[in-house]
Amino acid sequence: MSQQLLAELELILGKSSVLTSENETAPYLTDWRKRYSGKALAVLLPGNTEEVAAIVKACAKVHIAIVPQGGNTGFCGGATPDNSGQQVVLSLKRMNQIRAIDVSNQTILLEAGCILQVVQEQAVSEGFLFPLSLGAEGSCMIGGNLATNAGGTNVLRYGNTRDLCLGLEVVTAQGEIWDGLKGLRKDNTGYDLRDLFIGSEGTLGIITAAVMKLYPLPISQWTTLVATEDIPSTITLLNLFQKRATSLLTGFEMMTQESLALNEKHFPQMANPLKNHPPFSILIELSDHESEEHVRQLLESILEEALEMGIINDAVIASNLSQANAFWHMREHITLAQAAEGANLKHDITIPLSALDRFIQTTDRLMQKQYPGIRIINFGHLGDGNLHYNIAPPEGVDPISFNATNEKPIHELIYAQVESCGGSISAEHGVGQLKLGELRAHKGPVAHELMKTLKRALDPQNILNPHKVLSI
Ligand code: FAD
Ligand code: 2HG
Ligand code: ZN
């Protein structure tokens, strides 16, 4: 049966786009963190939407499950097949055409396999900003960004991927093509199908193309690194920037002393320019459409006010683009420093800003009490209330054996605090297979059952990315 399917897939795609040998398929079978590995009947590389539809029809006929994959940078194992060797991985990487830029509508129509950085660069070359920005932008793809509703560093000004999307083209679990690419800013014709597919992590449909919003390119961006003593003063600082800079505030990122110490251990060239290793280093970006002078003066004046209020101790303003980039590299390298240090436990959470201090104080205390010497690598998009509250074992302890014993109770401890503070267990990375077990408790039985009802209705054979997000 498998041989028959492979022959049919080769007819649809051509032999060279059906990968079956071990060395060709290997890069698609393990995730970025090297936490999940699987096997696949084949890795398929369709070149257009009709081919995707034909693949789904062929697989549906023989009940073979399909795992969609973009850049394979996801953190929750959503793009990795199981171990049965009976699933196919469908990589969108060959579908990487930017189909059109509509200058009047300020939109870009592109295929799911476009690499995010290529989209950003294309937008700039046409005088626009495509604001989605994240550390993996050199390899993640727009279809993956949509399927995970990715966040990143510009969310507090432009929203997450969902907010940037005006339309989708999707191949359904029956192999039908839904053309929802009108790109309208208003469309109240019943249920919002677009929003259903965004963030569904390949479990409801395969995204093949999208219409995304573009924005005017700012004239000038200014970046500063600021030292704060504690979370309450950091939030007062955020509120001050929100009040005085309003929509000019495009980034507000937090890095703890421990996060930057780990960075410096693995990347000594990335020393914190702020003096005396402050408890919190805050990276703030303003983007202006008026003039360089206007934004610089505004930034200096807000920082002066913050100093007078006693909510910051020190500040460094990037004097040129390369210094601003160095600040951003420092922020983005924390993930890489953690990877270099060894396996770690990720908690990508959101907490209402009003409960953030309580969350950190209580959780830090409980963690240290329960696991003396534990390393809490806490950083993230503080402007969105989104913490990457990551955990590494005490210095010198083997992470693999530590995690084998302690992963579950650590997740439970942290997620209990997230719940009690009214937060979410996934701010931006999604659920995949990593948080499958926790989702039911977190969503509550009614929401969880509604999700299952949708999944059964749209994919009754359960062939689209089964056992990801939901286990049915
Ligand atoms: P993949 O990893 O290939 O897939 C992710 C999920 O989407 C899987 O479930 C897959 O089945 C599904 N999928 C992929 N393509 C499609 C499609 N066309 N149709 C349907 N389903 C599909 N994430 C953030 O949100 N914010 C960050 O700041 C951030 N920073 C990161 C930094 C680094 C260094 C790394 C490695 C990752 C980071 N991520 C971040 C996580 C990751 O980059 C995002 O989740 C990204 O959106 C995944 O895109 P991808 O193309 O790699 O998707
Ligand atoms: C970021 O904000 C990413 O840099 C990665 O979401 C977070 O490594 C992480 O846990
Ligand atoms: Zn993040």
Image (spheres, rainbow, N blue to C red):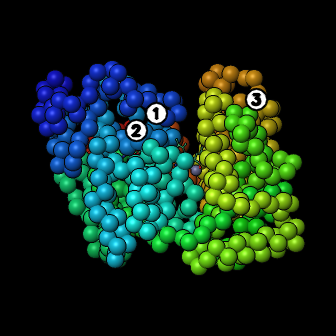
Q: Secondary structure at mark 2?
A: loop
State the separation of the CA atoms marked 1 and 3. 25 Å
Local packing at callout 2 (Cα closer than 10 Å; few below 14, some 14-19, many 20+) is: many
Q: Residue at x 62, y 23 (%)?
A: 400
Coordinates of residue 43 in the picture (x, y in percent): 29, 32
Asked whether mark 3 and ligand 2 are closer than 8 Å, the reply comes as: no
State the separation of the CA atoms marked 3 and 2. 31 Å
Residue identifier under label 2 = 79
Q: Are marks 2 and 1 in contact (CB under 8 Å)?
A: yes
Hey, what amino acid is under mark 3? Answer: Pro
Residue identifier under label 3 = 394
Q: Residue at x 17, y 37 (%)?
A: 13
Hey, what amino acid is under mark 1? Answer: Asp
Q: Is residue 104 left or right of residue 159?
A: left
Coordinates of residue 258 in the picture (x, y in percent): 76, 42
Residue 158, numbered label: none
Q: Is residue 341 left or right of residue 466?
A: right
The quarter of the displayed image where residue 282 is located: bottom right
Asked whether mark 2 and ligand 1 are closer than 8 Å, the reply comes as: yes
Local packing at callout 1 (Cα closer than 10 Å; few below 14, some 14-19, many 20+) is: many
Badge nearest the viewer, 1 or 3 = 1
Work out whether mark 3 precedes mark 2 in sequence or the reverse, and give the earlier one.
Answer: 2
Asked whether mark 1 and ligand 1 are closer than 8 Å, the reply comes as: yes
Q: Residue at x 71, y 42 (%)?
A: 270
Q: Secondary structure at mark 3?
A: loop
Residue identifier under label 1 = 31
Hey, what amino acid is under mark 2? Answer: Ala
Q: Nearer the viewer, residue 275 or 245?
A: 275
Coordinates of residue 42 in the picture (x, y in percent): 27, 28
State the separation of the CA atoms marked 2 and 1. 7 Å
